[in-house]
Amino acid sequence: MTGRWDGLRAEVRARIDELVAAGREDGVQVAAYLHGTQVVDEVAGVADRATGRPLTSGTPIWGASTGKGLTATVAHVLAERGVLDYDLRIAEVWPEFARHGKGGVTLRHVLTHTAGVPALPPDVTVADAGDWDRMCGIVADSVPLWAPGDVLAYHAWTFGWLIGEVVRRVTGRRISRVLAEDVAGPLGVPGELFLGVPEADLNRLAPVADRNLSAMLDWAAANLPNFDRVAPPGLRPDASVGTRPEFLRADVPATGTMSARAMARMFAALIGEVDGVRLISPARLREVGAVAVRGTEWVFGQEASFGLGYAVESDGAFGCAGSGGSLAYAYPELGLTVAATKTLLSAGDGDPMEELRVLVRDAVRAG
């Protein structure tokens, strides 16, 4: 890394050291790439509070829905190769999915959270989530709430099984394997991006813990009438889920496990070239990062904008964020990517990872 950004790195380091010292965080990773070169790679705190094991840049952390960025990226890499088409009707490769009038749902609908099937049965549990065939059966047999394209509704869990099963049907490989072989491997980060953590890598993870995320999820369930329909009580995206070995091992591609530096590297290879690797063409980049849908989102009742698989922000970024605070974003016009991962899952006390994203963005804009 060049000395030009020493000041930025020092400021990021000071911020995350302060967060850990104040007890707001246990372990934090922040990474950024600019025009294909890493310019930030900072770590603070520990990987495991119980043992004192140090957190490193390469330590994977469960990032909840930040993993949707991995899943969307797999779809785009396969589309780039002609294996997938965004207007593919899901039922063409997954005939069972056509039940109850879902034959018109396309991959594009899924990527934009407009497929009409965000809900899960109220009794679904974390144990069920690790059973691929069971969950795909539930999704295939689901009754759509609306016609495809009619309503923007965050598909909190079903997003993963919908895309993952399409990937499995067209490639013959689980999506976790496609990510490892076609994305993480070529980028040189095979042990840092997971949609299903191998048994041998489980002890490398930094376990997540709850700070106040569970309380926020309880509030959401009590105050948002549609929340439990997409995140039933037995399958909430919190530390009780993200610390279970059987869940972490399973392909549950609405969530993922990653290091910040690997996420920043992957997004850098989406918007440009990184050490000779470019995941998608400039033309595809323009499509996936542009606003495809915008409106009041059904679960949270707030205005939201999505491209193809990624949230699109008003500052020109596209990317993903997860319950508890981890995030990864790309700024195509700046040539910048930023990722931040953390072990202490929090909500409602400000958004320190978002503040770090803005800090890096503003520093790069200022030159």
Image: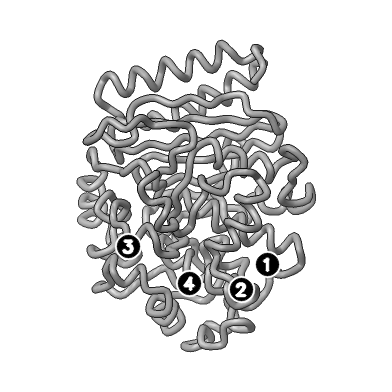
Q: Nearer the viewer, residue 348 or 6?
A: 6
> How many residues crowd around disc 3 within 10 Å: few (fewer than 14), some, or many (20 or more)?
some
Measure the alpha-carbon separation of dots 3 and 2. 31 Å
Q: Are marks 2 and 1 in contact (CB under 8 Å)?
A: yes
Mark positioned earlier in the residue sequence (2 or 1): 1
**To which residue does mark 4 refer?**
116
Q: Name the residue type under label 1.
A: Tyr
Residue pictured at 37% horizontal, 53% vertical: 300
**Quick one: SS at disc 4?**
loop
Q: Is residue 59 above or below residue 112?
A: above
| Residue at 65% across, 45% down | 187
Q: Earlier in the sequence, mark 4 or mark 1?
A: 1
- Looking at marks 2 and 4 on the same chain, the residue that comes earlier in the sequence is marked by 2
Q: Give percent across and percent down for residue 23.
A: 24, 25
Give the labeled residue for mark 2: 106
Q: Residues within 10 Å of mark 4 (few under 14, many from 20)?
A: many
Q: In this figure, which residue is indicated by the disc labeled 1?
A: 86
Nearest to N terminus: mark 3 or mark 4? 4
Would you identify the image quadrant in which residue 308 lies? bottom right
Residue 14 is situated, as x and y percent measured from the top left of the image, at 42, 15
Q: Is residue 24 left or right of residue 162?
A: left
Q: Amino acid at mark 2?
A: Thr
The residue that disc 3 covers is 246
Q: CA distance from mark 2 to mark 4?
A: 11 Å
Residue 73 lies, in percent from the top left, at: 61, 54
Check if mark 3's residue and mark 1's residue have beta carbons within 8 Å: no
Relative vertical location of residue 363 with respect to residue 265 in this rendering, above or below: above
